[in-house]
Amino acid sequence: MEFLVASAIGILTAAGIYLVLRLRTFPVILGMSLLTYAVNVFLFASGRLVIGAPPILVDGVETYTDPLPQALVLTAIVISFGMTAVVVMIALGAYLSSADDKVNDPTDPEAQAKAEEDVA
Amino acid sequence: MSLFLVVALPFLGALLPGLMNSAGRQACAGVTFIVSLAAFIGLLTNLPAIMAGEVVQARVDWLPALGLNFNLMLDGLGFFFAFLILGIGLLIITYARYYLSRDDNMGEFFTYLLLFQGAMVGITLSDNILLLLVFWELTSLSSFLLIGYWKHLPEGRQGARMALAVTGMGGLAMIAGMLILGNIVGSYDLSVILQNRELIQASPHYVPALILILLGCFTKSAQFPFHFWLPHAMAAPTPVSAYLHSATMVKAGIFLMARMWPALSGTPEWVMIVTTAGLITMVLGAVIALFKHDLKALLAFSTVSHLGLITMLLGTGTAFGALAAVFHILNHATFKAALFMSAGIVDHEAKTRDIPRLGGLAKLMPVTFVIATIAALSMAGIPFLNGFLSKEMMLEEATHTTLFGIPWLVPVLATIGSLFSAAYCFRFIGHTFLGPVRDDYPAHPHDPGPGMWLPPAILVVLVVVIGTAPFLAQPAVFFVTEAVLGGTAEIPIKYIKIWHGLVPALFMSVAAVVGGLIVLAMFKPLMRAWDAAPRPEAKVIFEGLVEAIVGFAQAIILRLHNGSFSRYAAFASLAIVVAGYYAWRTGTVGEATRVMQPVSPVALAGWVMLVAATCGLATLHRNRLLSLVLIGIVGLMVSVGFVFFSAPDLAMTQLTVEVVTIILLLLALNFLPNVTPVESSALRRTRDIAVAIAGGLATMGLSMHYLLRDAVTTPISEFHLANSYKGGGGTNVVNVILVDFRGFDTYGEIIVLGIAALLIYALTETLLSSTVRARLLNRVPDQPQSGSRHPIMMVVLTRVMMPVVLMVGFYIFLRGHNEPGGGFIAGLIVSIGVVMQYMASGFSWTAARLRYPYHGIIGAGVLIAGLTGIGSWFVSKPFLTSDFTYVRIPPFQEFELATAALFDLGVFLAVVGAVMLSLESFSRLARRQDAVDDAHPMDIDPSRDDPPDTDTTTQATEAT
């Protein structure tokens, strides 16, 4: 079971990095979302994997999973929504004002200037 | 008054001028004056204690672990400088009130000035060298702001930058020096350091510490070879030049040398470095000053020269030198501030301060003429004015100083310096005020109102009084000098007097004045020679140096940071992997203590789906809609994983966040292209895959590593589990941690979320008010639009579901303390309910039914959470301490009331507001000209029966 989680984290990270290295904003945003999943699961797993022992106190039950990573990850998930929204907004703003959704600075400034003129 | 208050008053007062800006210039200057006056009086209340020989102290521990304590002390030397700073400050504020024009932002000016004043007073009163460094840097920063005050002038901006670069770098060197010094003594308290002269001077680290500290002093006090920034700082408004760059800030370096005198001075290194630098600066500054045509540039170089003189006197390391230095600091502050203010008056009235365009002003502005002449003659060293007395003492000291084994070197150079000093003073008077009245001044010059001439006049009165009756100033000067000496030496003379008999200094003085007159008589040929001679231009050298350094840095950095985000990301990923690997190799790796749990078929199925979706996403990401479907699967499987591994709260949060994120991305995709083109080469993709696999393997290895090992120490969660019910009154430990144990974290997080939403709103507003708006309005959709804008089934369903959703949200919220749920999840659920209305019934319909703006909801949430936290203060508990009780209202069962629920309500509101504000902002972008929302989405519109044609739809809608 541990291997499944560890490999899932690894695959999410690898796919995330690959997408972050793409040249357009949309795949980069998707890649960052994948990295967010990977990091959240990683942090969550720092409480070790426990099956069937949620941290809801019940009389007579002695073992519970570690609640602290869960609390931290819970807020991280919500914050990651805020972060994604801001990044998407920036990407959208850049695309709408320059008609170009590339993430890298243009290697040829003249071509870029021309493209902007066309848009205007 | 407490020393803390004396230092704090200017800083606190700095808030006022900005606020008073709209109340008029008089109020703005008035409030600044009152603040300074209060600090000045506060300082004076400490005078009796100082006169009695006490050292007034005020101490509070700030960061004791670092040795940085907020310790202040006031002795004779500190009092002297603080007196000059606050006293001259009062005159400058009055003068600036009349100097600044109506176009200048007076509030801004006085705010900077008070910041500077506070920092400067802080330097003089610090008893902790680290605290002193803090104030030291603050003066550099406020000076930067003041020099660049006229932002529209390129000279101002360049001068400010140069001053900051030079004094800032000196400050850095000084930090290192002070740390070494503190290390030698074992304390950063100045009073301790000054007691340890032998220990410091015997240390092998003495010379590096000395050099580093002197670098700080020399840059600040414009000593050769760092003198060049000061003339360029003259681009500042004249009150700033008079205040910072003649009377106070440039004396900070001198002050520090005087302050450190008992601990550092007297060694051959000290004499060698300080005296030489001072001597060169004095002669060089005087020579350059003579040939400057700009009145302020002339005064700037003369300031450089006089600072050199004082430095040289401190450098000799004798008690007499220190006495002469202190006396000259006082005298220079009086006559130089007066001269700067006079130059400012000339500039203000004649609209030029270029000497060749002036002359003959004596008849036009007699008051200014008298003031400037007395001050200039004092600077030239004419008897019965205060400059004569200290210059005489300087020459006397020079005759006793031997440098490089040549006995005549110092006296001769000192005389030459004085000669040129006298010459430029005579030129200042002669070429500006004397001569025939001209008829080509840029403006008609006349004396200004008393508001401008009174401040320099007060200083000039001091010049004459001290010059004719030195015994009046003598006790103060002796007193300050004793503080400088710190008991290491005795003052050698009994009193300061005008006539010492026919001593060598007198002949040198006479030679200087006569020589000065001769030089002025030969000024024209000398000027031609000067113009013809090649001279290094400091500004060009400085800028060349800066450019070279920037070029060097760019040569290195551009390989990493060439504007390509992909490049940064790749380098960052690899760097993290390498650093992690290094940590792994060098750390201790324990044995595996946990056994692997058996894989269940359900878990395997989930894993397969997750991996398939992730790999599919990486390969099929070019189809953007498909990739959203795939990332939805990934999110879903992560949620399922959370349920499986005992984290129901996380699963609920992940699931709801997933919904809003996908809606958000769909909204964004509405504008973005639907496919990602193939752009990168196969080679590049292979490289990216290699980086990705390295990162993936690294995280996998790390996860595997710790999943098989128990925590090294017991997690603090034991405490949370044990106290959740007892102390927090809830059985859902995750929720209790969020709203209670770590409530402060959560409070910060909802604020961050709110800020993110406001940022999105602000960006949307910016976009909609730019040229993008027109383009958005006329955008032609790239996909065929559905004929039915508001499908009736969806409208009906979402409206029926709305109360149910709200009820579920309410239920989840209430049960959160004891069962999975809580404010975060409830907030997300309710947001989804509202978003459904937007999607089904349209923007206008929903917006028209919203009673409260989302900004307000965010604000209310943060406010409620904050007030709940503050509430605990009323029962004398720390912020956010929670309490709970059980009540029973018949016929209901007993239930719990907890303050944490109120906090959770704040969380709930902030989440609803933030999510909705973000999504609403996106949908506002999508509103187009032709998409006039139907007033009543449930009305049957016959035109929709026609094939989808946006134009006819619009007309039909408008007709209804």
Image (tube, coloured by chain):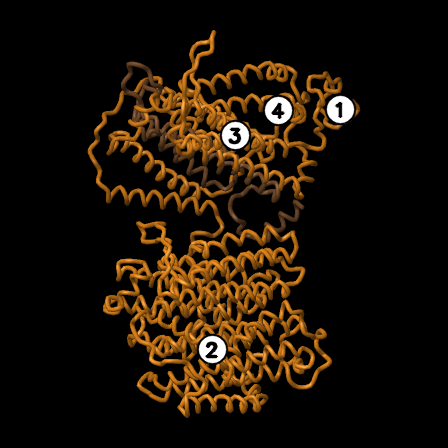
Chain colours: A brown, B orange
For mark 4, what is the residue?
B838
Residue type, label 2: Ser
- Give the vertical position of A35 relative to B259 (above or below): above
Residue carrying label 2: B305
Which residue is disc 3 drawn over?
Answer: B861
- Looking at marks 2 and 3 on the same chain, the residue that comes earlier in the sequence is marked by 2
Q: Chain of mark 3?
A: B
Chain of the residue that carries numbered disc 4 in the rendered image: B
Three-letter amino acid code at the position of disc 4: Tyr
Q: How far across and down, in percent of the image, does residue B459 sit?
A: 54, 73
Q: Is residue B866 above or below residue B596?
A: below
Of pointers 1 and 4, the one earlier in the residue sequence: 4
- Say which of A7 and B765 sits in front: B765
Q: Residue at x 34, y 36 (%)?
A: B699
Sequence order check, earlier mark of 1 and 3: 3
Of callouts 4 and 2, which one flags the residue occurring earlier in the amino acid sequence? 2
SS for tag 2? Answer: helix
The crowd level at tag 4 (other Cα within 10 Å; few <14, some 14-19, many 20+) is many
Q: Position of residue B938 (x, y in %)?
A: 69, 17
Identify whether B7 is placed above or below A103.
Answer: below
Q: Which mark is residue B957?
A: 1
Q: Secondary structure at mark 1?
A: helix
